[in-house]
Image: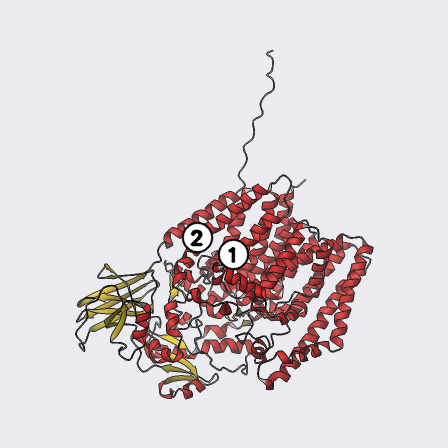
Amino acid sequence: MSSPLPTRAREGLFILGASVLGTLLFFHRLLASGGVFCERDMLRVYAPTREYWATCVSQGAWPSWYPFNALGQPFAGATVTGAFHPANVLMLLFDGPVALTVMVLACYPLAATGTYLFLRARRAGIEASVLGALAFTLSGYLVSLTSNLLYLQAAAMLPWLLLFSDAVLTRASRAAAGALGVTLALVLLAGDPQGFTVGGATVALVVLLGPLGEGVSRRRAVLVAAAGLLLAVVVSTAQLWASASVLPETFAQRRTAEAAQLWSVHPLRVLDLVVGNVLALEPPLRGAVAQGLLGLGTTDFWARSLYVGVPVLFLAGVAAWARRRERWVQLALGFVGVAGLLMLGRHTPLYGWVYELLPPWRAFRYPEKLTVHVAFWLAVLAAWGADALLERTRDERRRTAWGLLGTGVGVLLLAMTGMGLGLVESLRGLYSGPAEVWREVARQLGERLTVEAACVAVSCIAMGGVALLRIPSRRVGVAWVALLSVDLGRATEPAYVSCERGLLEAPPPFVETLQQRVGAPLQGRARVFTASGISLPETMEGLTPDETQVAGARVVLAADSAASWGVESANWYLPALSARVADLLKDPQAWWNRFGPLAGVGYFVADEQQVKARGLQSTVVATSEPFRVALLAHPRPSSRVYLAAPRCVASAEEGLALLSSPGFVPGQQAVVECLAPLPTPPAGEPLGQATLERYGVDEVEVTVVAKHPAVLVLSDAYFSGWSATVDDVPTEVLVANHALRAVAVPPGAHRVVWRYSPPGEGASMAVSGLGLLVCLLLMVPWPRRARREDATSTAAPA
């Protein structure tokens, strides 16, 4: 007779295989077209940063610095780059688009298998466990995360985190501690510090409040969980150190509560949660709904769909009632309640209280990210509710089934009688967008609400009808899984965006213009700033609305979409923005007239209206007619490296004031924060020449021929991890022009090399490796020593 462990392992492998096939079927539209995920951050963050990581590692270098965003940022310190995540190895095995597609698709079988195994560990039936796994994996929020790889990778770890937390409660073994440490660490290594913190808190609450297994004491469970959490911190040391070491120098420290709550779930989005993708209309109306109706500060949604559905909510309600005395159900309801209130962000006071009372929380942003916890626990509750129904006698099950069927009939009647249109019209008073588009917005919202409600009602009726049939419970469970698959596929499949590879692989037109003007490679030679508020067409012939948005982002060189061709963006998009650079970016007019060119920004992108309003027609070097945007060459940009006369100041505030004053001469002088006065050249004398010889991954080499003592300015962002040598002699890196780097050079010919190496980087990586090794050793099933039995008597001699 086989042991339970191999049986459960075979069951898990079967579910994993079935999940892989289901994922391929669900994403058939992407796979059939040979497309790639391209929405928002997939285009602007993960494609360029993962490609940069692969390029550096394949050359034998570790990418500590990222030059393509906001005058440069620490690469690992930006956190969202996921520099230490093991899935990045795929970038070395496949080309970039294929590797990213595999990374995204792999998350869904991983999430489904983890949810299934957690439910089975909690003694749910096979059919109910499959239903719960399906409800979480194909929920609207998780499908919408195809636009954001790091949060998808973190979400896929959530079920495994609960599985190993349950193992701590039931067995409290060293293997559970090791597995917990690796799993939680993977959340942070994906780039999600908020998920890491919330996940750790979830583990702590589960272990403190959850039901214990036979023979396991609460003290032992707490000690094992604490060991697991400590190991997670140790394994994550490399990322924690990289992020914490740069945090004091970044703009994140200044983030306001309002900015942190930009993407909060509006209460109206309960419609999306219950009946489908109602509010995220196609452009151009999507912006009118996001800004005019929901009051978002952006024209798009963080997640296009939040769908869970009436069937899942109904089954979750069954669990909440039928198993209300069970500790795990109580925990699940508590997590749903707290996470549900927090994800509402600025629409309730709770998130603001947490933000103010817990200072470490201020580094986090966007309450909508907590929706993953609501989706997961609702799926788990639905599985427990389905299990409770399937365990009942046929007559008891039929009584509850009438409730599900009646719910569906009620929703269908509301849809057929036009309640959706009436509800939308009642929202007119909340709408603050363009009045001329309200009629079309209301019409489309009403139609979507009616159609989605009718579809979800049919799913409820079908599931309730099946439960009324005189068939075995197992067949009812299988039918429910099939019907829920259809319902979720219908509602959430449109939520992901894919594009043809050709749209992304051809260089944007302005890249070709830059290459013609400055030559190749562009890195170190062409820094571009894209003006905010550019008006782009919402639709174009031959492209879908989503493809139009992607094409527009690439044409305007939105950060960091053109990094693949070496274009450095001065725009801020990654979170490790230098606080000093943020000061320069604050005033758009001052940035164009003085600070941008001073920071080596030689090119700007603006639309036709902006060019005409500012009278910049003479600076246009190229235009893109379909999108009505222009590439401008600034008439007086500073070189990337140049010699300047130092003007010493004692503080950053004094330096910024001097930098803005009429007495400062850009390109000839440099405002330098220095403790002791620096030698200054004679006024009006030529200072010499500086030549950029090499612009490497974490190293910049410059040759200088100085006629007088001066400072060599490099127009890249200052961070404390930078060091410099002049003719191989270490020298102090100075803050120049408030946010840039400089070194003092004496007269003569010199070789200056800047290197970026965050202090403690090597040691932190060694600690992480040691922590991972300890976790793996704890998880190895070491053979136990056979106990010697003491003899109770000796044999008598013959």
Q: Quadrant of residue 427?
A: bottom right
Q: Residue at x 52, y 43 (%)?
A: 780
Which numbered disc, 1 or 2, marks the residue closer to the eye? 1
- Say above or below: 471 vs 617: above
Check the picture and name the quadrant holding the N terminus: top right
**Which label was assigned to residue 262?**
none
How many numbered circles are shown? 2
Check the picture and name the quadrant holding the C terminus: top right
Front residue of this view, candidates 125 and 207: 207
Look at label 1 and name its amino acid.
Thr
How far across and how far down the image is residue 7, in percent?
65, 46
What is the spatial separation of the Cα atoms under label 1 and label 2, in whole angstroms? 14 Å
Q: Residues within 10 Å of mark 2 (few under 14, many from 20)?
A: many
Q: Which residue is mark 2?
A: 237
- Say above or below: 140 vs 285: above
Front residue of this view, candidates 441 and 665: 665
Q: Which residue is mark 1?
A: 197
How far across and how far down the image is residue 386, in percent?
72, 57
Look at label 2 and name its amino acid.
Thr
Q: Secondary structure at mark 2?
A: helix
- Say above or below: 258 vs 430: above
Q: Quadrant of residue 133?
A: bottom right
Question: Relative to 526, is 712 on the left or the right?
Answer: left
Question: Can residue 23 be seen?
Answer: no
How far across and how far down the image is residue 163, in percent?
60, 50
Q: Residue at x 56, y 26 (%)?
A: 788
Question: Can residue 256 be seen?
Answer: yes
How far across and how far down the image is residue 266, in percent?
60, 70
Q: Earlier in the sequence, mark 1 or mark 2?
A: 1
Give the residue at the far top of this rendering. 798
